Amino acid sequence: MRVKVAPGSARPELVELGWRQFLVKVHNQAGTTSVLRGTSSQARRLAGAMPDEVRNLWLDLQMFDSQPLTRTLSGLALEYRIVQLYSRDPGQREATVTFDVGQGTQDLGYRSEVPILFTIRPAQSVPWRVRDETGAPTVAAFVIRDAQGRVYPSRAKRLAPDFAFHPQVYRADGEVVKLPAGKYTVEYWRGPESVTKTQPLTVVEPAGSASQNGGPAQGASFQIERWIDPAKFGWWSGDHHIHAAGCAHYMNPTEGVLPADMVRHTLGEDLKVGATLTWGPAFDTQKRFFTSRDDLVSRPPYLLHYDVEVSGFGSHQSGHLVLLRLKEQIYPGGSSYEHWPTLCLNTLRWAKRQGAVCGPAHSGFGLEVNSADRRDAALRRDRRERVHRRRDARTGGLHLHGGYTLRVGAEHLVSHAERGLPHTDQWRDRFPVCLRRKSGTRAFVREARWQTRLCGLV
């Protein structure tokens, strides 16, 4: 059984940063009931692609197999399927689309694929207005969905500063978001200290805008609402374990992302302190951002600081270590990570001599609360309602280490400092008295006490 493909009569028109649907007429002479798959060499994910491939990976493709359709072909002699196509670029681009019904069904003469030259209309430019609870311009997280639930921009076509491993993007006041004309639902927030809101957005296509640059569209305005401000009580939100390379981050087309990409996400989650930890993957690339001081992209009171997690090298087999406020990044005797000691104690002694704060990277394992105690259950439910706010599937814009299955809404690092806003590099003095809150009241108390004791802090 072989699959042959020929172009149909539909005009090959797409829209920049938007989806278009096309009917696929299927002459099923073999009566197969397999899944009809559509693919394209231009439709691979950008995350993980080689640098010289990025320009050509402009298409996203998915087959629609939900109701009223079935996942597989019906076996009838004639039926129709739906293919959905998304374009990253405007203008004219060519793609080769291939169809098959399983391994070995591609036509030997390449007749299962068809090259198509698409004309792609530009999207509309939507000015974004984002204000915090005081009315000041800010950065926030946004999940933009159309009526079919599809997320914009397509996660398959994201590179930094947008990350493909979560649905949200982070946008600042005054930036422009490009969207095709249509109706959308926008969910937005600014960290677990804010209230998650949802509002509709209609993007219009003004008359005469179907030309080169996409016409102006209505602006979008978003007002952040805060339900609590711990900084007023001397507590500073943050996270002491985020990565800019490896784990969910891509290693191609670049080895991780830049400080400017990381700080956009910490700003969007209202994290006053972000400790970006260089570890095994892309160590030699990411180590260049270490300065022993707050990174220049910091915007006090929002501080980004590079340090180290001993993971993927050295003594990691006996436990991953987080080393904060280091003055020297590399263990003596080399310029990378191959020579690091294999005993945790030697690593800790070296770091402590610098005045570093050290502790286990995954100290929360085994501390989850599974009690049926009514009071604990009520406290956990109250915390979920106020903090998680339906955020179970998100990572808060940062790649938090998967050892905890961390979420910004579920785990928040806070530093009890003196009253007043932190200034550049002052966070280093506050880290020795920082606690990590974990969802579940008893787990939070136990972990906080244990971790501070382990670090020699109490």
Image (tube, helix red, strand yellow):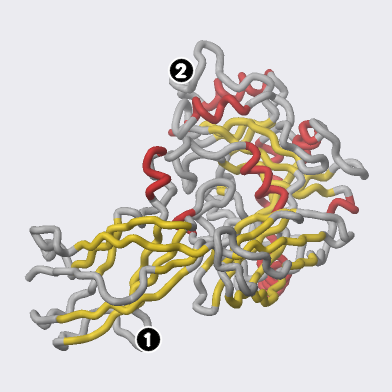
Badge nearest the viewer, 2 or 1: 1
* x 44%, y 20%: residue: 338
Q: Where does the N terminus fall, quadrant-wise?
A: bottom left
Asked where in the image residue 23 lies, by quadrant, the reply is bottom left
* x 58%, y 72%: residue: 181
Per the image, label 1 sits on a secondary structure element best described as: loop
Q: What amino acid type is highlighted by mark number 2?
A: His
* x 45%, y 28%: residue: 313
**Residue 416, horizontal then vertical, whole percent:** 83, 45
* For residue 56, side relative to residue 153 (left or right): left
Q: Residues within 10 Å of mark 1 (few under 14, many from 20)?
A: few
Q: Is residue 152 above or below residue 311?
A: below
Q: Residues within 10 Å of mark 2 (few under 14, many from 20)?
A: some
Per the image, label 2 sits on a secondary structure element best described as: loop
Q: Please report whichever mark, 2 or 1, sits nearer to the chain's N-terminal start.
A: 1
Numbered label attached to residue 339: 2
Q: Which residue is mark 1?
A: 67
Which residue occupies the foreground of this view, 343 or 48?
48
Which residue occupies the foreground of this view, 452 or 181?
181
Residue 208 visible (yes or no): yes
**Residue 223, horizontal then vertical, whole percent:** 80, 66
* x 49%, y 45%: residue: 249
* For residue 264, side relative to residue 12 (left or right): right
- How many labels, in total? 2
Which residue occupies the foreground of this view, 37 or 319?
37
**Residue 319, horizontal then vertical, whole percent:** 50, 36
**Residue 278, horizontal then vertical, whole percent:** 56, 33
Asked where in the image residue 219 lies, by quadrant, the reply is bottom right
Residue farthest to the right?
Answer: 419
Q: What amino acid type is highlighted by mark number 1?
A: Gln
